[in-house]
Image (cartoon, grey):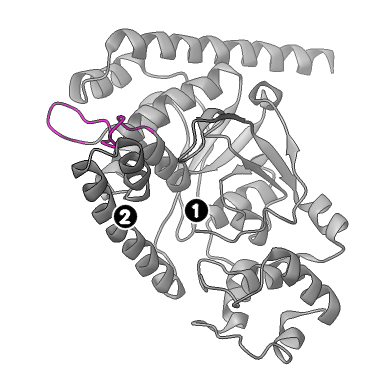
């Protein structure tokens, strides 16, 4: 779910090409879930190979990454590690939603309501262990660095950005801000033309940048107060938040009282599955690692083709064409960086 701060944080829309030359630490699980959800047949069935193995995640990861490389963008994928114990309630909540969606999907499919079936199918997306392993193997063949986080991927991505090893963290969720990311990039993996659910309406989804410094300045708060707001609204560690409190109301409450501790003395219906102080401490000091290396190499074309085409039934012509565009983009970016360095 992630914390919902969309109504109060300032955003700036950009084009993908504007990110050329930038290093982006991507929340891998978040991206893979997006691919699993969006890349499906009209009836909601995910893409599969001849042996029945799901390939939607690989399709999205491969073609989107090639697109980024073609534009001169340098991605890093960060994978979740062991979730903290206090996330257990959120994990159970997500599983319940998926189970209910599965039943509704099957019912809609039986009754021939294909558009509705597809919507429910998207809600059933479940990232299995072999899918993460698939993704890591593909990234290795493509020469893209990936990092195994000890715990939350967004926390690790934020840490990489704070160290200056990445220009942006990329995720659909706003949690990266609570973990201290200097710049959050949303819609990176889903940019493009998208159909609105239940409507015959298409919209253009563009990447958007949210800068921590501007968020704090515009809202007139500190990062610790931003975390307090997130806890009132609801995070992965207290998914329900406080009943009746959304982002705008939470902002007013924290600005009035100064801190969550003081605010809770007047909020009578506040109940938390985990001590709010423990949640706040995790956002301020998450479990992360400095044990990683960042190096981008040109894709091993034969390795990628062997995996995607030889083992997972992808079209060899399409794969080779996408790889060539990616390689050309990487070479152009290297030439530009060399020229920029020379003239600097």
268 displayed left or right of 327: right
The image's mark for residue 78 is: none
Secondary structure, mark 2, is helix
Sequence-first disc among 1 and 2: 2
The residue lying toward the viewer, choosing from 101 and 306, is 101
Q: Please name the residue that numbered disc 1 is placed on.
A: 153
Q: Where is residue 58 in the image (x, y as percent from the top left)?
A: 34, 31
The residue lying toward the viewer, choosing from 23 and 339, is 23
Label 2 Cα crowd, 10 Å radius (few <14 / some 14-19 / many 20+): many
Which residues make up the magenta segment? 39-53
Task: Based on the picture, tell me whether residue 42 belongs to the magenta stretch.
Answer: yes
- Residue sitting farthest toward the front: 111
Q: Where is residue 161 in the image (x, y as percent from the top left)?
A: 65, 47
Check the image and report above or below for 148 versus 302: below
* SS assignment for the magenta stretch, majority: loop
Residue in the image at 57% along x and 49% along y: 157
Q: In which quarter of the image is residue 241?
A: bottom right
The image's mark for residue 101 is: 2
Q: How many numbered dots are placed on residues in this image?
A: 2
Residue in the image at 75% along x and 43% along y: 11
Q: Position of residue 196 (x, y in %)?
A: 51, 37
295 displayed left or right of 159: left
Residue in the image at 40% along x and 44% along y: 33
């Amino acid at each position: 779910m992630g914390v919902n701060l969309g109504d109060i944080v300032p955003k700036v829309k950009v084009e993908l090409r504007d990110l050329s030359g930038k290093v982006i630490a991507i929340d891998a699980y978040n991206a893979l879930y997006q691919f699993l959800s969006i890349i499906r047949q009209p009836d909601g069935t995910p893409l599969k190979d001849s042996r029945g193995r799901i390939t939607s995640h690989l399709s999205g990861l491969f073609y989107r990454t090639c697109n980024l490389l073609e534009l001169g963008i340098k991605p890093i994928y960060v994978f979740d590690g062991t979730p903290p114990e206090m996330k257990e309630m959120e994990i159970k909540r997500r599983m319940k939603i998926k189970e209910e969606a599965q039943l509704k999907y099957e019912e809609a499919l039986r009754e021939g309501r294909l558009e509705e079936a597809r919507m429910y199918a998207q809600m059933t997306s479940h990232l299995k262990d072999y899918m993460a392993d698939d993704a890591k193997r593909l990234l290795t063949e493509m020469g893209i660095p990936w990092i195994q986080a000890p715990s939350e991927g967004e926390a690790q991505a934020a840490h990489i950005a704070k160290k200056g090893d990445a220009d942006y963290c990329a995720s659909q969720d706003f949690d990266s801000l609570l973990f201290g990311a200097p710049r959050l990039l949303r819609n990176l993996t889903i940019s493009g033309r998208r159909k609105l659910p239940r409507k015959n309406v298409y919209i253009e989804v563009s990447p958007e940048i949210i800068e921590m410094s501007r968020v704090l300045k515009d809202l007139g708060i500190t990062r610790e107060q931003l975390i307090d707001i997130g806890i009132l609204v609801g995070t992965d560690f207290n998914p329900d938040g406080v009943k009746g409190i959304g982002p705008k109301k939470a902002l007013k409450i924290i600005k009035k009282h100064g801190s969550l501790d003081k605010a809770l003395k007047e909020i009578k219906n506040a109940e938390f599955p985990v001590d709010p102080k423990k949640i706040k401490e995790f956002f301020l000091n998450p479990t992360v690692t400095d044990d990683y290396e960042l190096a981008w190499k040109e894709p091993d074309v034969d390795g990628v083709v062997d995996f995607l085409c030889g083992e997972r039934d992808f079209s060899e012509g399409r794969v080779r064409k996408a790889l060539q565009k990616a390689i050309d983009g990487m070479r152009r970016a290297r030439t530009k960086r060399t020229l920029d360095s020379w003239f600097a």
